[in-house]
Image: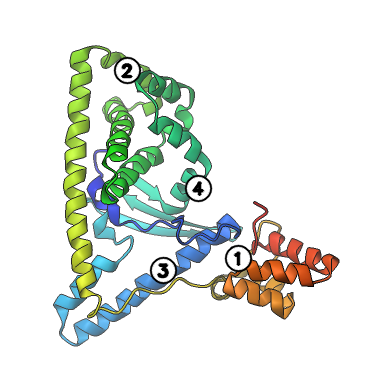
Amino acid sequence: MSGFDYSKWDRIELSDDEDTFHPNLDKNLNIRVNRITRDRKEEEINEEQKKLREQGDVDKAEKMEQRRPLHVENLCHVAEERTIIHSSDGSRKDKLKKGEESFSIDEYTMYKEQHQALLDKFENADWEESRSLLISRGDILMQEYANSYFMLTALSEEMAGNRKRMEKLCRQGQIISQIFQLAEPMKRPPRDLVPRFFERFEGDASKAAFQEGVDHFKDQLIKRAIIKKQEEEAETAQEAEIPPDAKPVSLVEAMYEMSLEERKGPGGLDPVEVFESLPKDLQECFKSGDIEQLKKVATDMDPKDFDYHFDRCIQSGLWSKA
């Protein structure tokens, strides 16, 4: 864990961003759509930088790095590699590797989605409850993604001015982080060291030492939040000079950019084929993402016809049962 510079992670653009997730779209297709948007943004930045360098405007080209998501130099000081793996079943995994460490964007997305309730419970736990949760649910809470979650969320809350929640997240995140630090030189799984960690900090003096580590991390995070705000202000000032980021890719457009295996839905149907078979008014609903329009179409259509098409939309990932 010590190889990471966590202060750099605040510029990671994660594919489960709530602002870009459609609540009724199949979650896996959501991730793929957001990945296409992210990759397109990278491509547009590369193209614009190339043009600027050809024009001799190197400074402006360099400034564009502030707009780049997942840029390799923003995550840590050691060499790193981004790998996109296409499996034989058509799936695709997006992973960042840094020395001996790796961070999978897609897996972090799914981790948060599947375990948010437990993460919230741990966030609000006191010392004894934290011990109990880490022992009983260490299979989830002692994953590296939990450490990442508390750091990233703490920074986000500080940026939003929510100091009280930030302090709580820092404290709970440091419990996990310090257990990882304890386990590292021993070459042991961090989960095995949970009892020893809490035994180590039983006394008042030991708890004061732990709190000192929390306060140090919190101070560094506050400083990083200040710098990040300054960077965002500078970026805003540059928006008139630098072309805007790519707009989110629409669902329909994204489908046509995926391979057949990559875009297949949970029921094995091809969303492109299903979309093209829909009546025109239903197609317009998916193009616009207008839920009210979809409700109106459902009312106007023959129920059997609507149920047939809507079931195929679910099987192809165009719509989520949830």
Residue 119 vertical placement versus 43 (above, below): above
Indicate the amino acid at tag 1.
Answer: Arg
Residue 125, picture quadrant: top left
- Say which amino acid is labelled 4: Met
Give whichever of 187, 168 is nearer the camera. Answer: 168
Residue where numbered disc 3 is placed: 39
Question: Where does the image place residue 321, in percent across and percent down from the top left?
Answer: 68, 53
Labelled disc at residue 110: 4
| Tag 2 secondary structure | helix
Q: Residue at point 64% right, 51% down? A: 322
Residue 53, compared with residue 5, is above or below; it is: below
Percent across and percent down for residue 96 are 36, 54
Q: Residues within 10 Å of mark 4 (few under 14, many from 20)?
A: some
Query: Mark 1 = which residue?
Result: 263
Badge 2 density bin: few <14, some 14–19, many ≥20, Cα 10 Å: some
The quarter of the rendered structure image containing the N terminus is top left
In the rendered image, the vertical position of residue 109 relative to residue 210, given as above or below: below
Q: Toward which corner of the image does residue 148 lie, by quadrant? A: top left
Label 4, secondary structure: give it.
Answer: helix
- Residue flagged by tag 3: what amino acid is it? Asp
Looking at marks 3 and 4 on the same chain, the residue that comes earlier in the sequence is marked by: 3
Q: Nearer the viewer, mark 1 or mark 2?
A: 2
